[in-house]
Amino acid sequence: MGSEGSRVVVPRNFRLLEELERGEKGIGDGTVSYGMDDADDIYMRSWTGTIIGPHNTVHEGRIYQLKLFCDKDYPDNPPTVRFQTRINMTCVNQETGMVEPSLFPMLANWQREYTMEDILVNLKKEMSSAQNRKLYQPPEGIDDQRMEQKGLVLRCCIL
C-alpha cells in the first residue's frame, strides 16, 4: 500500500481550521488563548493571541496582546509574531514588538508540526526564564503605540 515512513501532509487551510477550533475551545489553564482577527478572511492569515503573565515574575497579572500573521507558506514556515502590548523580553524587538526569530528558538528552528498555541505557550515559558523574569517592564496601559505592521505586510504581498 504505502511506503513505510511516508506521512500525510495536511493542507494549510485544514490545519488552520484545526487550530481555530482548538483556540476557540480554550487552552490548558486559560492563561493563553488565540483566535482569528476577521472571520471573513478566507485565507485565515491574521490572528490575535493573548498571554496572561506567569506567576512569580514581573509579568504576573499583566495581559499581553499579540498579533500572529500566517502567510501563504504557513505551516511550512512560522508566522510572524508581534506583541501589541509593550514588553521587555530578550527575544522581542523593543521598537516594533516583533518576536525576533533568531532570538526565539521555536521560530528559528521551526517545524511544520508546531502551532500558534505552541508559540504562545513557549513565549509564556520564556517570560519565566532567568533572563526575562525580572526585567524592568514598561508601565501598563501603553499598548500599541508602535507603527501598525498590517499595512506593511499588505504592501509586501502586493509587490
Image (cartoon, rainbow, N blue to C red):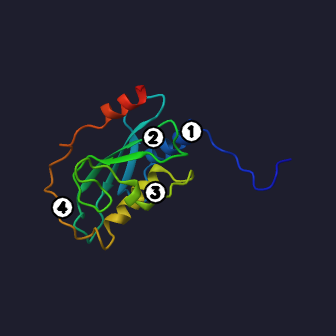
First in sequence, mark 4 or 1: give its number: 1
Of all residues, the one furthest to the front in this rendering is 159
Instruction: Classify 10 Å Cα crowding around label 1: few (below 14), some (14-19), many (20 and above).
Output: some
Q: Which mark is residue 108?
A: 3
Query: Label 4: which residue?
Result: 137
Does 43 sit left or right of 4 as displayed? left
Q: Amino acid at mark 3?
A: Ala
Distance, label 4 to label 2, CA atoms, is 28 Å
Viewer-nearest of discs 3 and 1? 3
Q: Residue at x 33, y 59 (%)?
A: 91
First in sequence, mark 3 or 1: give its number: 1
Q: Amino acid at mark 2?
A: Cys
First in sequence, mark 2 or 3: give its number: 2
First in sequence, mark 1 or 2: give its number: 1
Q: Which mark is residue 12?
A: 1
Of 46 and 40, the residue lying toward us: 46
Across and down, in percent, residue 118 comes to: 46, 56
108 vs 36: above or below: below
Distance, label 3 to label 4, CA atoms, is 25 Å
149 vs 132: above or below: above
Of 17 and 26, the residue lying toward us: 17
Query: Label 2: which residue?
Result: 70
Q: Which mark is residue 51?
A: none
Across and down, in percent, residue 19 comes to: 50, 45
- What is the secondary structure assignment of the residue under circle 2? loop
